[in-house]
Image: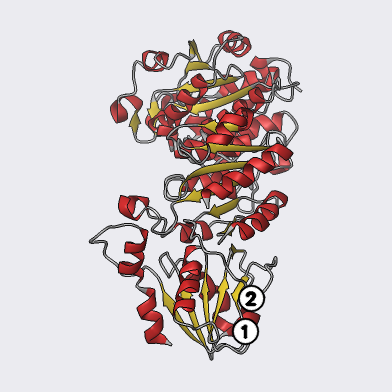
Amino acid sequence: MRKIFAKILEEKLVQDKNNFLITGDLGFKVLDNIKKNFTENFLNIGICEQSMLSFSAGLSKHYKNVFVYSIANFNTFRALEQIRNDICYQNNKVIIVSVGTGFAYGKLGYTHYGIEDIGIMNGLPNIHIYNPLDEKQLRLIFNKILKINKPVYLRLNRDSGEKFDRSHKLDNTGFDKINYNPKNKITILSYGYSTSLAYKFSKKENLENELNIIDCYQLKPFNTNEVLKLIKNSNKIIILDEHRSATGLSGIFSYNCIDKINEKKIFSIGLDNIDFSRYGDHDFMIKKYLNFEKKIKEYI
Amino acid sequence: MYKNVEKFCLKLEEITKEIVVKSNAAHLGSSLSLINLISNFFVNFYKKKNIYPMIVSKGHAAAIYYSALYLCGDISKKEINTYCLNNTLYPGHITKNIKYTGLPFSSGSLGHGLPFITGLAYGSKKLKKNDKYFVIISDGELNEGTSWESFLVCNRHKLSNLKIIIDYNKFQSYGTTKEVLGLNKLKLKLSSFDLVIDEINGHSNTQINSAFRKNTQNTHVIIANTIKGIGMGKLENQLESHYINN
């Protein structure tokens, strides 16, 4: 998704020089075109994430949209106080762009896993959080974030390569009906890469006529009314997080909907209570630690 | 508006002490070490064309900064009297308020103001604007990595529109700067960053005025030797002046 992000940002830079991209010494083969062709709107500030985020808050006084690009852990955990104090509390519009979400960097070890970042960002005031599934969603989200006057956290996951045969047109509600039939009694709520996993699973197991898949590309603000409409007829809800459940979509959903879903059974699948003993590539890590296919089959 | 720095200093000391004692707040010593630096800025530079409001990154010097805004007529007497009291808009660390030109940024956690203003100065230079930027950081704040990151960034981009004033009062919150992290030979340490470094008496209005007006080809770092708690009698130059107000 990061290459798609770079492509879209390039298009926007051509249209409007009031955009600026800062990277924390990352972007090889991804940001090369922007670095070469938009020298006035690009800065590799170096490996100094805390300064980078405070700096971006200052720079946002000169540019309408300042994008800050790094790996999920570095531009969130490492600079959390800077995001909190200088960006969120002071409502300085900075768009924090994270790559390496979930297990995308599986082989590199847990220092490079973005599996707790939603939780900490969700705890901050003023900020919007988006996690696009594909280019279609990213374009819609891009148009949104260029218009709003709030800080944004934009999570980019590994491109699944999947072409989603959506049953409904993508809209602005914060949810994407990847597979939706009001008659289906089971719904999977997921986002980003985990939606692609659910989609592949559903096709493989021929569950399209039983299983709704709703992608939640807008995690904050969470559109509670819309999600309640979408799950109205389901009596089983599976929430799939490539993230700690408690602080991922499961936590967000529970907090927002707890008093409205009494009769429904909620099943969270995420990365809780795990001890990293082994590491491997993305698919290996998903299979070993998320193990969602087995869990969904057992549940339904 | 005051036109005389010495008169401003005297009044500023009076108001600062008054509001700190009234609210039984801390950090009076940290405020007073800035007396001449703040006075010079507010008399000679504040609200002048192309001068961005001073960022005081050592946000715990809120008392003196708010008092300066009061003396300039930005904050009313009624408001300044609420400093650090219940229901105040003026808590013990400088807090942004979009109503006032002089409160563009909240500081309080050390190490934020300098990278923030570095971003401002960078953007201004990039867009060929003619603005000048001033930031005061504390010597203790040099414990924070972002300070040194910012020096690197400043030099890399030759931010000659930025003046960084170090309030070198030799104390931080739990010891001298020398005993805590060995912060000495400061001029020598800083000179390796290729910035323009000047060391002055931070209580000499003449030296301050000269340093503030100096044009430089790179970021200007002014090491201002100051006295923590100046004007606090026996608490002058004592760690206790960080905590006790009389």
In this view of the protein, which residue sits in the foreground, B206 or A204?
A: A204
Residue at disc 1, secondary structure: loop
Label 2 close to label 1 by CB (< 8 Å): yes
Q: Quadrant of the C terminus of chain A?
A: bottom left
Dot 1: few (<14), some (14–19), or many (≥20) neighbours within 10 Å? some
- Identify which residue is drawn at 43% across, 77% down: A268
How many labels were placed on the picture?
Answer: 2
Dot 2: few (<14), some (14–19), or many (≥20) neighbours within 10 Å? few
Q: Name the chain letter of the residue that bears numbered label 2.
A: A
Q: Residue B92, located in which quarter of the rendered image?
A: top right
Q: Name the chain letter of the residue that bears numbered label 1.
A: A
Task: Report the residue marked by disc 1.
Answer: A181
* Residue B71 horizontal/vertical position (percent): 70, 29
Check the image and name the residue furthest to the left.
A277
Task: Report the residue marked by disc 2.
Answer: A167
Taking the image as shown, residue A65 lies to the left or right of residue A291, namely right
